Amino acid sequence: MNYYNKNIECAPRSEIEALQSYRLINTVRRVYENVAPYRKKMDETSVRPEDIKSIADLSKLPFTTKQDLRDNYPYGMFAVPSSEVVRIHASSGTTGKQTVVGYTAKDVDIWAECAARALVGVGATKDDFVHVSYGYGLFTGGLGMHYGAEKLGATAIPASAGNSVRQLEMFRDFGSTVICMTPSYAISLIEMMQEKGFKKSDFKLRAGMFGAEPWTEEMRKQIEEGLGLKAYDLYGLSEIMGPSVSCECLCQCGMHICEDHFIPEVIDPDTLEVLPAGQQGELVFTCVTKEALPLIRYRTRDIATLVYDKCECGRTLVRMLKPQGRTDDMLIIRGVNVFPSQIESALLSVDQKATNYLLVVDRVNNLDTLEIQLELRPDMFSDGVGAIEGYTKKVKAAIDSAIGVGINVKLIEPKTLARSSGKAVRVQDNRAIKNKFEKK
Ligand code: DLL
């Protein structure tokens, strides 16, 4: 088993916690002195930096949310002057104003180490060709994994996202061995392979690091089979750092968090109480080494579980299980809470290849409606009308029973839905537009 930094990745828990405590105390002091919004928040809740003596005191600190970053847009939460900042990134900002994040040279170096740990964790070495198809730009995916590959001494291939045929040609011609991209883009490359006559034996792919969006175990199987590699889950968020906050190891049983840099907690999103290990809730991170943007108790909105059990790989760093969606992704359909990930899982349990779909939520006569538009595939036409009807019924039954609300299944022409080379858009909620319109 290989590690990038065995001393920390396999450290006894007591050592990890001692290091976290030491770093937390320094971070809290630093943000109190240098970040006006934090000083204000701490003063309002009467917490003084001296009150934080170890990680046991973490829960005394106030939370940070995306709204705090928006309120202090663009640089108001930075803890260093701009002369110290060597890079900024920004979140995709699909809802509301985008949030800007910054890094000092040391932050970039630590990020590169976290990404190098992630790469080594999935078996990469200096001999690998790491093909990065996450977007390069304000999105953290591309540059984040790129710097990790270089830090490891592997060969980085900065392909960026898009131009699918060219990506496949590069896999073949450049001998890519490790790929990094969103899982939905991997699926669309598999489709393109079939269309353009590429075979997985044309490639030398061994491992893929997929993340930036939720994906299911069913998708993992399909990607592994379609590309002929092992598919690993990679997690991160720009506010905390970018990709490689955590990543799966060869055991594929949860993602080891770089706990020496980011202290995780899981809270109940309603009561804000910290939950015991093993319970599912909202993931919260505190950055304890970040210089430019050390966020304290940042509420990610991601729903996950922390697992402290021993991992076969020998790493002692805590694992987070696959995020089960985001608290703000949750749809309320006729009063029932529905997560898009539940629907995807039910759909793929009936048909592993059904990865091109769109959920359309609407309101008709004051009643919420939920429809799944599902692309037909050419191979389904030969099955005849009866088989297609049977298929539709099966999909409907599986989803209805998974979410407890009736869904309408609508089959649509092949290749009607937009393909994404980044994060896939799976939900179209027309109620938001109607609400806006109706209020006028
Ligand atoms: O998506 C960073 C990233 C890039 C991670 C490349 C992994 C690979 P943001 O654009 O700020 O940053 O989006 C962060 O994406 O809060 C999750 O909701 C979601 N997300 C990221 N990784 C995963 C994953 C990047 N493995 C938001 N599984 C996070 C599920 C994920 N959701």
Image: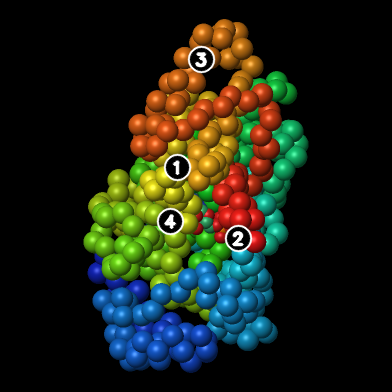
Please give left or right for residue 55 compared with residue 287 in the image.
left
Chain-order first, disc 2 or disc 3: 3
Name the mark nearer the viewer: 3 or 1: 3
Residues under numbered marks 2 and 1 in contact, where contact means CB atoms less than 8 Å apart: no
Distance, label 2 to label 3, CA atoms, is: 40 Å
Q: Which numbered marker is on residue 341?
A: 1
Chain-order first, disc 3 or disc 1: 1
**Residue assigned mark 2:** 439
**Amino acid type at image mark 2:** Lys
**Amino acid type at image mark 1:** Ser
> Within 10 Å of the Cα at label 1, are there few (<14), some (14-19), or many (20+) other Cα atoms?
some
Q: Which numbered marker is on residue 389?
A: 3
Distance, label 2 to label 4, CA atoms, is: 25 Å
In terms of depth relative to the viewer, which is nearer, 5 or 74? 74
- Give coordinates of residue 406: x percent, y percent: 42, 33
> Within 10 Å of the Cα at label 4, are there few (<14), some (14-19), or many (20+) other Cα atoms?
some
